[in-house]
């Protein structure tokens, strides 16, 4: 499998159709599917032993049945320890700090284009393809640029904003110019049906329970009831544990008032939940840390469009560098529910300039 391309296969239609597109181009190809240990019906559990080597044969895995249909071999990779350490532990730690994590951004940078890419290289692949809806373009100087995918609804460039130049140089996104509707239609015409799931879940490692229940089952996680206060600091109620809430949340506060209360802030060191009314959610600026600049790092103020969560429309803002990897974002118009722990991603029209983590 030397000098071939690896295609990451989740079992859903996006990755399977991406594989078919690459196969039709005559590209030497093999598939890789990773086991996290958190699958609904995982063939491996956290305590199971695993044979040495970058990949292993698992003839009874549902994806292995696709080898004949797709026309290339599929390797199953065990990344349970890496996934637990980089994604699940991060998720638990962020909630313990009173922040709202974004595991997909971490997974893409640390797992798919980190662990998985390295394993693919060991198996002989020079590049890694995935079913993401995003686009990569290389310029004349050999630098790589990340853009939104053609489907404005399905675009996943936000989740890829922490990739660096080396990772982007190794990435292929065959669905870059397609919409989800296109993919479903053409996959159906080819008789290509999802093997494991039709769609990715919001949090892939949480199965058949809420994230709150998942957190409560983690031995390293602890939470306790505490006080709910208003903007003036007056106690007006009690909360069930800070992990039950996120900034901008309205439901679950259960405090009668002339107008609804929303979560404005969490103060984990004091175990306090701060609430206010809708207008109190608006902020004119935020601090973003651990910045990853895909292009050249700005040395002075710049204008950009800032997206503060996946389903948020990117809005005009001024970006002010304040440190080696920190910036202050000044929104042209105040924004609601800017949430610590979520990603802030900066765009120039459809191009991703970089991204980081909202601190405050």
Image (spheres, grey):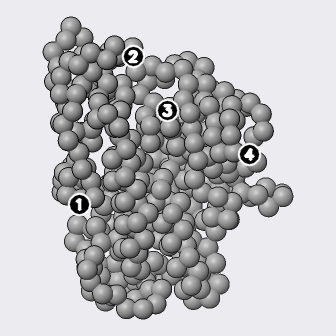
- Dividing the picture into quarters, in which one does residue 271 lie? top left
Secondary structure type for disc 3: loop
Query: How many angstroms separate mark 4 from mark 1 (CA)?
Result: 40 Å
Judge from the rendering whether residue 42 lies leftward or rightward of residue 114; answer left or right.
Answer: left
| x and y, in percent, of residue 323 in the image | 68, 40
- Dividing the picture into quarters, in which one does residue 273 lie? top left
Pointer 3 and pointer 1: residues touching (CB < 8 Å)? no
User: Mark 3 or 4, which is nearer the eye?
Assistant: 3
| x and y, in percent, of residue 26 in the image | 60, 79
**Of callouts 3 and 4, which one flags the residue occurring earlier in the amino acid sequence?**
4
Image quarter in which the N terminus is found: bottom right
Judge from the rendering whether residue 239 lies leftward or rightward of residue 163; answer left or right.
Answer: left
Residue behind mark 4: 297
| x and y, in percent, of residue 27 in the image | 61, 78
- Disc 1 packing (10 Å; few <14; some 14–19; many ≥20): few
Residue behind mark 1: 219
Residue behind mark 3: 360
Closer to the camera, 289 or 10? 289
**Of callouts 4 and 1, which one flags the residue occurring earlier in the amino acid sequence?**
1
- Disc 3 packing (10 Å; few <14; some 14–19; many ≥20): some
Image: 352 above or below 133: above
Query: How many angstroms separate mark 3 from mark 4 (CA)?
Result: 22 Å
């Amino acid at each position: 499998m030397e000098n071939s391309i690896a295609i990451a296969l989740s079992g859903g239609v996006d990755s399977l159709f991406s594989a078919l597109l690459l196969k039709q181009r005559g590209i030497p190809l093999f598939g890789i599917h990773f086991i996290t240990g958190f699958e609904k019906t995982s063939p491996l559990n956290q305590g199971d032993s695993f044979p040495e080597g970058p990949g292993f044969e698992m003839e009874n895995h549902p994806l292995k049945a696709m080898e004949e249909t797709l026309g290339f071999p599929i390797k199953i990779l065990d990344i349970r320890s890496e996934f637990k350490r980089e994604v699940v532990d991060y998720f638990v730690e962020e909630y313990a700090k009173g922040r709202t994590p974004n595991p997909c951004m971490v997974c893409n940078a640390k797992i798919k284009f980190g662990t998985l890419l390295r394993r693919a290289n060991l198996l002989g692949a020079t590049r890694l393809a995935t079913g993401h809806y995003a686009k990569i373009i290389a310029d004349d100087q050999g630098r790589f640029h990340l853009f939104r995918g053609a489907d404005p609804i399905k675009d996943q460039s936000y989740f890829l904003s922490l990739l660096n130049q080396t990772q982007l140089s190794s990435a292929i996104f065959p669905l870059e110019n397609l919409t989800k509707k296109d993919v479903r239609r053409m996959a159906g015409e080819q008789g290509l049906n999802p093997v494991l799931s039709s769609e990715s879940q919001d949090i892939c490692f949480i199965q058949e329970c809420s994230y709150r229940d998942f957190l409560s089952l983690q031995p390293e996680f602890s939470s306790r009831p505490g006080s709910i206060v208003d903007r003036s600091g007056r106690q007006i109620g009690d909360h069930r544990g800070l992990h039950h809430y996120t900034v901008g949340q309205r439901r679950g506060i259960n405090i009668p008032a002339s107008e609804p209360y929303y979560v404005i802030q969490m103060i984990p060191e004091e175990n306090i939940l701060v609430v206010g009314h809708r207008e109190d959610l608006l902020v004119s600026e935020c601090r973003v840390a651990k910045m990853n600049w895909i292009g050249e790092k700005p040395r002075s103020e710049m204008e950009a469009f800032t997206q503060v969560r996946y389903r948020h429309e990117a809005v005009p803002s001024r970006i002010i560098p304040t440190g080696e990897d920190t910036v202050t974002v000044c929104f042209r118009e105040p924004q609601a529910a800017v949430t610590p722990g979520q990603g802030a991603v900066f765009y120039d029209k459809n191009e991703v300039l970089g991204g980081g983590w909202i601190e405050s």
